[in-house]
Amino acid sequence: MRAREIPSLALDSYQRAARVALANHLVTSTYPDRIALPLLRRWATELREDLLELFGYRLEVTETTARLFPVLDALDPTQPARTATDRIFDRRRYAYLALALAALGRAGNQITLSELADHVAAEAGQVDGVDLEADRASDRDAFVDAVGWLAARGAISLADGDAGGWANNPSSGEALYDIERSVVVAMFRPPRAVQHLRSVTGLLAGAEAPLDDEETSQPANPKETLRKVRRALIERPVVYFDDLDQDGRTALAAERTVIDVELLTGLVAERRAEGVTLIDTSGRLSDIRFPSTGTIAQVALLLAGEISDRVVDPDAAELTRHSIPGDADLIEHLDGAIPGGGIFDDLAEFAIAATGVDDGIGSVTYPFIENSWLRGTVADLVERFGRTFAAQWQADPDGLRERAVTMLHRLRLVSIVSGGIIVLPAIARYRDVMVSVRDRAPQNSLFDGTSPDTETETH
């Protein structure tokens, strides 16, 4: 492992480069910032070797891009593409994104937004269930969101005009973009030809594994087992022993497995009887900080404490226990979005069939809490601390509950299921949450009165 050879004074720089690569699978001259690419280029040789050795990831670095090719062991619904306003991409936006990227690959050095829209509209007409009508405002908004996602990552850069003007009125607004060819080429590099896939599971590790029982019954490769466990450590907020098979549990329990990841990333491992989590004090690898500021994060933390207390409350009724559902529903949902008909029928004969996904969870059960309890608890939190919450959430407790529970789900502290949540062990670290409400000095109101300003601190 090359990280062991790096002088201690330079190790922090190397670890920052590793975190940037792992957090941003595509790095350009402007994304995620202007210092990321020079940092990766400085450590490119060492990173290539360590990322391949520890995780099986391949890293390509050029003068204009750095592209990490991860290995997917499971589907992750918690990291969707998002708009500039943090809105989650829907099916239409994903379709426009894919079609726009294909059109940019065939374009010249520049393209106007209306020209790109025309290309996407023409291609969308060949796919059942997808269309782009420039006269429809909702289509224009979705298309501009997809274009904005590409622009944020440096695939295109605005040379003149304004995309918002075109979205408001395509007859009078326009935008001209420069195309960064190297970024476009680096951006979409799936491990397999997606047009040949019958199922999204074809993108996962082991999708090309032989189906013969005699061959698949051979013992797992210890090196690949280690890589799979390390990948879980950096891709999941928490890795539970119950998530893994017996070989994986043995690998996770081995101190060397976690130490190597700590050395590469600079993260600190926290071991518990139920599993391992890596604490990111730098904030450069995690896509979500917790605990954090803001009403959603504050309520999520308060709710985590309430949930933990409910699970261990000896005076309350005993909770039922449920197992975490596998990926079957998600796979079915994604596979149902694969276009049928048109050009896809011609490719079906070459398709890679779906493969089974072993999520390792099995029949392990955890406490189940109903939505009615969550609604009542959040309503109580709003009553007690609502004056310190953002105004929009004071008026929308149901929306506040959904956002807070979603945050806990993304952190693998709970699992959202029909009718409620399944409580996972790591949430217990947030028991005994302490709350302090600070009253800031009153300020003059518009009518020469005073109104106290408050804020909540949770820890």
Image (cartoon, rainbow, N blue to C red):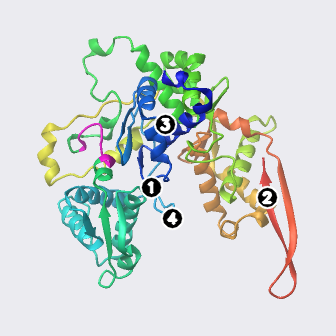
Nearer-N-terminus badge (2/1)? 1
Q: Position of residue 7 (x, y in %)?
A: 58, 26
SS at mark 3? loop
Quadrant position of residue 6: top right
The answer, for residue 308, to whether it is visible in the render is yes
Indicate which disc residue 456 carries. Answer: 2
Residue that label 3 marks? 325
Which residue does the image show at 22% across and 70% down from the upper left?
118
Q: Residue at x 21, y 66 (%)?
A: 119
- Disc 1 residue type (three-letter): Thr
* Location of residue 196 in the rendering, given as x and y in whole percent from the top left corner: 20, 41
Disc 4 element: loop
Q: Mark 3, residues whose alpha carbon is within 10 Å: few (<14), some, or many (≥20)?
A: some
Coordinates of residue 418 in the picture (x, y in percent): 53, 47
- Mark 4 or mark 3: which is in front? 4
Find the distance from the CA under tag 2 to the CA under tag 1. Answer: 36 Å
Residue holding disc 4:
85
Bounds of the magenta segment: 186-194
The three-letter code of the residue at mark 3 reads Pro
Which residue position holds label 1?
30
Give the amino acid at mark 2.
Thr
Q: CA distance from mark 4 to mark 3?
A: 31 Å
* Residue 458 on image: x %, y %: 78, 50
